[in-house]
Image (cartoon, rainbow, N blue to C red):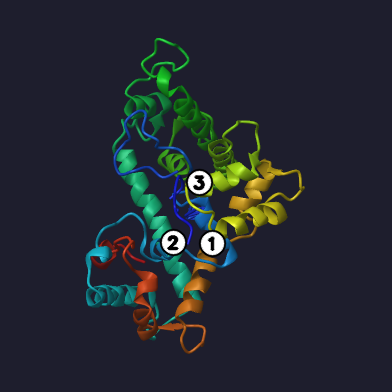
Amino acid sequence: MKKSISMKLIEVYLIFALVVITYSSAIPKPGEDKKNRVHEQKLSDMEHEHEGEHNPDYDHEAFLGKDEAKTFDQLTPDESKDRLGIIVGKIDKDGDGQVTEQELKDWIQYVQKRYIVTDTDRMWKDHNIEGDKLSWSAYKQRTYGSDDDPNEEDSSTFSYKDMIQRDERRWKTADKDNDGFLTKEEFADFLHPEEAEHMRDIVVKETMEDIDKDKDGFISLEEYIGDMWPDKNEEEPEWVKTERETFKTVRDKNGDGKMDLEEVKNWIMPPDYDHSEAETRHLIHESDSDKDGKLSRDEILEHYDLFVGSQATDFGEALTRHDEF
């Protein structure tokens, strides 16, 4: 299993992607590395999803949701099964005792959307909203402590120049009507660009910028491997050797020894790829003991460690929330 490093969830492509850049529960202070990449998951881990080898943490987050944390990992197996059983009842919409592929896919999509809505609501309330919109100036003031022009060397924000310019580029892309303000819906696109079609190019550019260490506009083989496996003090594991070959035969489509923007886009956002459908099929494939294409409550509980585990995020709130699924 590859180790997660600079990128924690592609929720996504997520998210996602799943994955993705996702903000923390509090506004980061200037200088914190809060916007390194859209995806919360390491790109290398996302490739497990694309190519059939799954990271258990990804399964847990896709099924349970990533916003609530630190509950299932503190439970005993019996307690985990009890809570999971309640969640299964929510997923089984028609109450026939069988979770179909569509029901499971609907649940995973619901969890993903609910996280985005909750995260956006939390962040929106933490800013100085003017009417029903947020200005760039107000956002910059709240996030960086000043709305100074970062291009001025004596500005208090000069040391954060690159971060602010990157924010502003994303801001302008999210601002559909180009009025300089973001509505709450536009702000959601700003926070979670991996979920908005018109923001996809920003995801690719930010990914490219983060991995392209020599800033030549391409991702070389060594930059690709270095982003996944930074610890060169140990013997290169087998999966790294596999990734080297994958880069040459799959990622670098034109065979020039590097990935350009289009090749990076095909890598992290493969066309016609539905992460919720892929995750659904994976979970059913791994848990469907009688191979009838559906999951019974017993099958899910029998494979509870696939759905929840030591790194699983908490979905306890789902057991008490009154919103409809």
Q: How many marks?
A: 3
239 relative to 177, above or below = below
Give the residue at x 49% y 45%: 230
Is 88 or 208 nearer to us in this picture? 208
> Which label belongs to residue 58?
2
Quadrant assignment, res 226 = top right
Q: For marks 2 and 1, give the CA distance.
A: 10 Å
| Image coords of residue 17 (percent x, y) | 50, 54
Please indicate whether residue 132 sits to the left or right of residue 200 in the image.
left
Q: For marks 3 and 1, give the CA distance.
A: 21 Å
Give the residue at x 42% y 65%: 56
Please indicate whether residue 127 sits to the left or right of residue 8 in the image.
left
Q: Residue furthest top?
A: 154
> Which label belongs to residue 48?
1
Of marks 2 and 3, the one in the foreground: 3
Please indicate whether residue 171 sits to the left or right of residue 302 in the image.
right
| Image coords of residue 218 (percent x, y) | 66, 37
| Image coords of residue 205 (percent x, y) | 58, 38
> In the rendered image, which residue does mark 3 sit on?
232
Which three-letter amino acid code belongs to the residue tagged 3?
Lys
302 relative to 165, above or below = below
Q: Residue furthest bottom?
A: 290
Residue 322 appears in the figure: no
Q: Earlier in the sequence, mark 2 or mark 1?
A: 1
Q: Earlier in the sequence, mark 3 or mark 1?
A: 1
Query: Which element carries disc 2, helix, strand or loop?
Result: helix
Is 195 or 205 nearer to us in this picture? 205
Query: Which element carries disc 1, helix, strand or loop?
Result: helix
Give the residue at x 69% y 56%: 250
